[in-house]
Amino acid sequence: MSFIGIDLGTSSVKAVLVDDRQRLLATAARELVVSRPAPLWSEQEPADWVAATLDVLRSLRDATPDAFRRCAGIGLSGQMHGAVLLNERDEPLRPCILWNDGRAEAECTEIEAIEPESRAITGNIAMPGFTAPKLLWVRRHEPDIFRRTRKILLPKAYLRLVLTGEAIEEMSDASGTLWLDTGRRDWSDRMLAATGLDRSHMPALVEGSQPAGRMRPDLSRELGFDAPPLFAGGAGDNAAGAIGLGAVATGSSFLSLGTSGVLWRTTAGFEPRAGSAVHAFCHALPKRWHQMSVHLSAAASLSWWASISGQSEAALLSELGPQAEQPSPVLFTPYLSGERTPHNDPQMRGIFAGLGHEADRRTMTQAVLEGVAFAFRDGKEALEAGTSPIEEALAIGGGARSDLWLSILADTLNLPLKRYRQAEAGAAFGAARLARLACTGEQPETVCTPPSGEADTFMPHPARAAAYAERYAAWRRAAEVSRTLR
């Protein structure tokens, strides 16, 4: 018996095939393109997700035909918050408005005015990246599309609809819509009414480890499965990453250095802290929740700097070597798409500060890495305010392949970080674990174990940590300047 995990990300669709001993048998990925037709806008075509997903499934089949054929279950992980608007024939009415789209700032204020209990119900401050404000924007600016909308799905739920014919979503992803009563793990009629919607516009809800449809028989035959695989509810990308890392017990933490940045902590219950723009969401497992600080441009900042400087990311990192002995004299604020924690401001913009004739590409590259690390420190302080400190975190995401970057993060956060090779499979691996749980009904703790094997450990160095603590104060002043730029 084997299981497949599919991660519908922003920059690519990734898939893994694992056996019943959780060994990775095959991986595949296909890139995606983001469209930015106007300032603050970020969109994708749902048809591109479907094409890329079918492509990665065929790649898994070609790599390991016997194991692929015997696949019992598929789990889905997905980029969160996107708004896929469907007509009565389940056809998209417009491109999906993505998680890092910032156009709906005014609508956030409107939602909280219409429903004053919004933060208490959802556990979260209204943010432009969430799904509900996007629908108010569509109602105001594209009224014909709003009128024709019969169903609203998140990205991975749309993918499930195409693959199974079922409109089903799970709790962790639904938490990021601003329509979920996060403590009760159910759609909130009051929050839906605040955006002119009702339950008929929503998919059914399940837990991430529960069954959530089977692949369409015709598609299953076309792809070459012995029988239509069962789909699990799955998870939002960060919750899937947590499942893959075994971050299921209270207090488990990880740092994700991907396109966006996340510092995660699993909680025993629903513990909202909306005032500091910390996310309080359901976990992908029943009766569990989590908190996150979220930063919109993490590894995306290095990608941007690479495109500006005309160098590859690898080339930029190689110029710096494996260790930064002291902070860069240049400061960088990574607000290329605005920021969530702790500012909740889509209008914030990044800056370089402290430039002089002595500044060169190396110092500016180091400033980019440090600017992202300082933003993570903002998030860590928001997560720890009034509660216990985070003692250690696992590191995942594309940026976590850099020893230099993880060393800077460990020093800046004054936090030990661990990186496991197995964790590179990330959210797709977590989705495969959820597929197994849906098929077998096993206890999550027996399947969702932490990575094994030798870990790379990045310990904060006392002298460098002190230097970064001092530099952080200067960076915070630069961040305040970023808030005034419009």
Image (cartoon, rainbow, N blue to C red):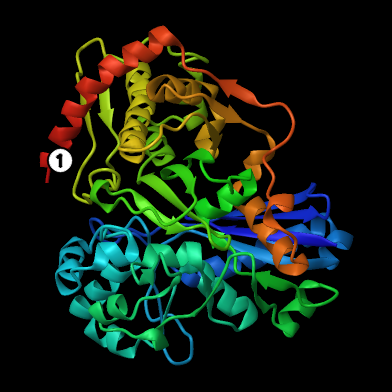
Image check: 471 left or right of 318? Answer: left
Residue identifier under label 1: 483
- Is 153 rendered above or below residue 469? below
Which structural element holds mark 1?
helix
- Residue 181, given in percent of the width and then of the height, sits at 37, 70
Image check: 137 left or right of 121? Answer: left
- Residue farthest along the bottom direction in this orientation: 88
Residue type (three-letter) at the residue carrying disc 1: Arg
Q: Nearer the viewer, residue 44 or 392?
A: 392
Image check: 261 left or right of 205? Answer: left
Q: Nearer the viewer, residue 292 or 358?
A: 292
Q: Is residue 322 visible?
A: yes
- Residue 395, given in percent of the width and then of the height, sits at 54, 34
| Quarter of image, res 272 | bottom left
Q: Nearer the viewer, residue 266 or 111?
A: 266
- Residue 187, given in percent of the width and then of the height, sits at 40, 76
Image quarter (top left, top right, bottom left or bottom right) of the N terminus: bottom right
Image point 78% across, 66% down: which residue?
440
| Quarter of image, res 328 | top left
Q: Is residue 325 visible?
A: no
- Is 477 rendered above or below residue 90? above
Image point 40% across, 65% down: which residue?
182
- Is 339 rendered above or below residue 385? below
| Quarter of image, res 184 | bottom left
Image point 37% across, 67% down: which residue?
177
Q: How many marks?
A: 1
- Residue 200, given in percent of the width and then of the height, sits at 41, 88
The 10 Å Cα crowd at callout 1, few under 14, some 14 to 19, many 20 or more, is some
